[in-house]
Each structure stands twice: as C-alpha cells, then as structure tokens.
C-alpha cells in the first residue's frame, strides 16, 4: 500500500495526547535567545536552569570514577532499581546530610529526576484523579496532563515568597490523590519555613486518617532536588523528618543534577514506601530510563566519600550564593533609585525572583508592555538580558521573573545590572 494513503489530515496522525501536548515554554524561550546569539547579538542568557559546565564543573572525583568505570567495561544493563551500591550510597548520603533514613529497597535510581516524576505520576494517578500544586511551579502541568489528571492550581503570593500556605491548600485536599510540592522551589529560589511545612503535613495526615485504608491515600511528592543548595540562616526542611508518619505518604524526588552541577550526567533518585518505589521501577523498566551503569558506579563511589561531597557542596553554595546575593543587592539598589523593580531574598537553588513592574509602560517605538512575555522580550531586545516570566511556570501575574545564575560568570553581573538600568530608562509611562 502506498505510504501517502496513511497520512490523512495532519491533526489525525498522532494521538490526542500528543496533539495537545505543550512543549516547555522555557526551552522555547532559550531557543529564541540562542537563535539571536547565533546571529551575533550579545545576550546575557539567564533563562536556563542549567550550569555552564566550564564555570561549574562536576566534582573531579566523580568525573574520574566515571572514566574509570568505562575503562573497566561496566557497560551492560544496570539493575532495574539502580545498582545496589548506588542505592546504598544514596541511603548513606541521605542519612548523613539529609536526616532521612531510607534503605536500598526504598530507593529507585533513574536517568535524572524527570523519569522518576513521570513514573511516580503513572504509579499513583488514575484518569481524572485530582492533583494539587502551587503555581508558579516547574512542569507539574505537563506531568498532570500526561496522566490525564484533574488539576487544581494554587496561585501563591509574593508576600509568602511564592510558597503555598497550609490554609490555601486545605480546601482542596479532600479526595485529592497527589499534592506536588518543591523546596527549594524552581522558579523562585525560596523555601518552606518549618512551621508552614509542618502544618501542611498535619493536614495530609488528618486527611489520610479521615479517608481510612479502603481508599487511595493522599500522597505528597516532595521534590527536593535543590536541597543541598541552600544558604545562610535558612534551613531546608523535609516532611518526613518533621512528621515521621509522613513516610507512608511521601515520595521524594532528588538527584545529582543540581547540587553537583551534573545535569548532563543523568543520575537521579526517588525515595518512598517500598511498594510504590517497586511499581515506579516496573514502569521505568518499560521506558528504559536507567542512569547509565558507569555513571551509577561512579556516583556510588563518589557519594560514599562524604568528605569530598561536603567540600564540593560548600564551595558550590558559596559561589551560587555570591551571584544570587549580588543580583539581589543590585535590584534592591535599582528599587531604591526609584525604578519599578524588586527582588525576593534568595534562600536556595540557583534562582532569584525578580519583579519588573512594567505593565503599561511604553517602549521607545511606542509599544505598550502588557504581558510577562512582552516584558521579557523588551529586556532581551533592549538590555540584552534573558529572564523567564513566571507565566512560563503557570502563574497568572505579569510582574515576576526567574533569573538563573548557573551560566553567569560573576564578572557579568555588573554589566547586566547596568544594561537593565539603561533599558528601564528608555521606558515612559
Ligand atoms: C524542581 C525540579 N525538579 C526536577 C528537575 C529535573 O531534574 P533532572 O535534570 O535530573 O531530570 C528539575 C530540572 O530543572 C527541577 O527544576
């Protein structure tokens, strides 16, 4: 049969799920910026949640172990759950640095954190189940869509550092299957305070006690992939240390991508109740999204070297915090000079939350800025600086933006702030 017969009309050639899938807005924006750069424009690209690997290389001990594992031909299939030595090393790492007790059966390894989030959604969610997550947040809209769930988005507030309050979540917990939280939060670089997280845990426990054992519980996904990157006085808190009973309902998402600047190495882990981890493993088996075996063997060796881990993380934190604070101080200075900008004190991750209250302002060529996307384009075109509007993370406001420092040499900070100041001066109201 000639192949043209199969290609009918364009909308009919893939599943409805594939047709309606929205690509990542952030990757699209980063692509537009790359395009401009390739045409010779000078753009400071602060849009990507990644590292420049020359500025922030992975730990040298980890790199050497990866090379060694390839030399030793460790190149066949890894165990479906992840090599035992790595699950054991993650267990030790979580106990030493994260105050969490998980044994190897309660840990699953995959190629970074994304496959774990996907398989967790597939493991817990039936069609039309309710998922609650705060916005702005990273990618929960896409994972919910792929699991055909009903979504309840809670719009968070700047005065609460864009973290959700227990009182905002409470009305929606009844009959929900999953609450998806993240701390330190992408895109804001802010974290849960202990009291607020305790209150949320208490609500989850209350709801599960009310629900009884014949109904599917309310689970908590706690994405703490940035937890090692936390600064100053602020401490990272997790639901299970605060409320041990939460261990029955919590699935942690974590990995090497952010804390060890290893986004391209692809080693992530989830920890949670053994039965859930085992089902997640079964789903991953059909995707084959295992972390490469040499990387797993190397991660096992590296994560067991607590001294090396501790020294890498403290240097990493110092360098990330320096950049974030310098930008924060720069925006506070612009605010003091009367520009309509602000920023939220950074607490963790590689992000600063920046306010550019420019809706209604007019550009040089008479264009009135309306949306976060307009403002972001104005900034790219006039200041040569790329930031991501919070609308790309599902938020409905137009004033707030994510600034990522993972690819920013500290020598760029002053010129970037100056460019932004000069661009703001071109606007009229
Ligand atoms: C909050 C959060 N969770 C998970 C991930 C995914 O991490 P990985 O690259 O290990 O898949 C990211 C990546 O940006 C993230 O920001």
Image (cartoon, rainbow, N blue to C red):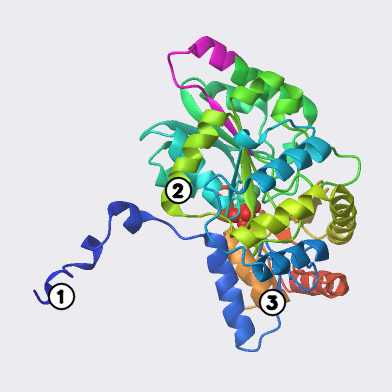
Residue neighbourhood size for the residue with mark 1, other residues' Cα within 10 Å, grouped as few (<14), some (14–19), many (≥20): few
- Which percent across, then down, holds residue 344? 79, 48
* Residue found 39% across the figure and 55% down from its top: 21
Closer to the eye: label 3 or 1: 1
Q: Which residue is mark 1?
A: 3
Say if the magenta span includes residue 213: yes
- Which percent across, then down, holds residue 329? 89, 57
User: In what quadrant of the picture does the C terminus appear?
Assistant: bottom right
Q: Is residue 388 left or right of residue 2?
A: right
Classify 277 as above or below 331.
above
- Which percent across, then down, holds residue 43? 70, 78
Camera-side residue of 119 and 30: 119
Gap in Å between the C-alphas at discs 3 and 2?
Answer: 48 Å
Q: Which mark is residue 285?
A: 2
N-terminal of the pair, mark 3 or mark 1, is 1
N-terminal of the pair, mark 2 or mark 1, is 1
Q: Which mark is residue 382?
A: 3
The answer to whether residue 182 of the structure is visible from this angle is: yes
């Amino acid at each position: 049969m000639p192949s043209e017969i199969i290609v009918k009309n364009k909308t009919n050639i893939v599943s409805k799920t594939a047709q309606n899938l929205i690509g990542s807005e952030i990757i699209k924006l980063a692509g537009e910026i790359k395009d401009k750069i390739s045409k010779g424009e000078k753009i400071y690209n602060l849009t990507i949640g990644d590292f420049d690997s020359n500025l922030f290389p992975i730990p040298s001990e980890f790199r050497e172990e990866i090379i060694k594992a390839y030399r030793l031909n460790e190149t066949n299939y890894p165990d479906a759950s992840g090599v035992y030595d790595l699950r054991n090393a993650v267990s030790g790492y979580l106990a030493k640095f994260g105050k969490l007790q998980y044994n190897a059966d309660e840990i699953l390894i995959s190629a970074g954190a994304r496959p774990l989030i996907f398989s967790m959604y597939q493991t817990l969610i039936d069609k039309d189940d309710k998922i609650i997550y705060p916005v702005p947040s990273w990618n929960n809209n896409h994972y919910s869509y792929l699991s055909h769930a009903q979504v309840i988005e809670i719009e968070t507030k700047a005065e609460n550092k864009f973290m959700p309050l227990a009182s905002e979540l409470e009305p929606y917990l009844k009959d929900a299957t999953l609450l998806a939280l993240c701390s330190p939060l992408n895109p804001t670089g802010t974290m849960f305070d202990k009291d607020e997280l305790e209150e949320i845990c208490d609500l989850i426990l209350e709801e599960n006690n009310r629900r009884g054992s014949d109904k599917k519980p309310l689970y908590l996904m706690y994405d703490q992939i940035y937890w090692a990157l936390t600064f100053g006085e602020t401490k990272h808190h997790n639901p299970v240390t605060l409320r041990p009973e939460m261990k029955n309902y919590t699935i942690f998402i974590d990995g090497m991508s952010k804390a060890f600047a290893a986004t391209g190495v692809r080693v992530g882990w989830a920890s949670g109740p053994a039965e859930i981890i085992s089902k997640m493993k079964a789903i991953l088996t059909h995707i084959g999204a295992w972390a490469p075996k040499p990387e797993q063997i190397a991660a096992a060796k590296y994560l067991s070297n607590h001294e090396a881990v501790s020294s890498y993380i403290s240097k990493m934190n110092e360098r990330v915090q320096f950049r974030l604070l310098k930008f924060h101080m720069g925006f506070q200075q612009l605010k003091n000079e009367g520009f309509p900008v602000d920023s939220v004190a950074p607490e963790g991750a590689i992000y600063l939350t920046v306010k550019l209250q420019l809706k209604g302002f007019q550009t040089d060529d008479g264009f009135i800025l309306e949306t976060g996307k307009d403002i972001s384009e104005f900034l790219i075109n006039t200041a040569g600086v790329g930031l991501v509007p919070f609308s790309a993370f599902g938020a409905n406001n137009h004033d707030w933006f994510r600034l990522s420092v993972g690819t920013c040499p500290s020598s760029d900070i002053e010129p970037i702030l100056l460019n932004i100041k000069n661009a703001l001066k071109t606007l009229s109201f």
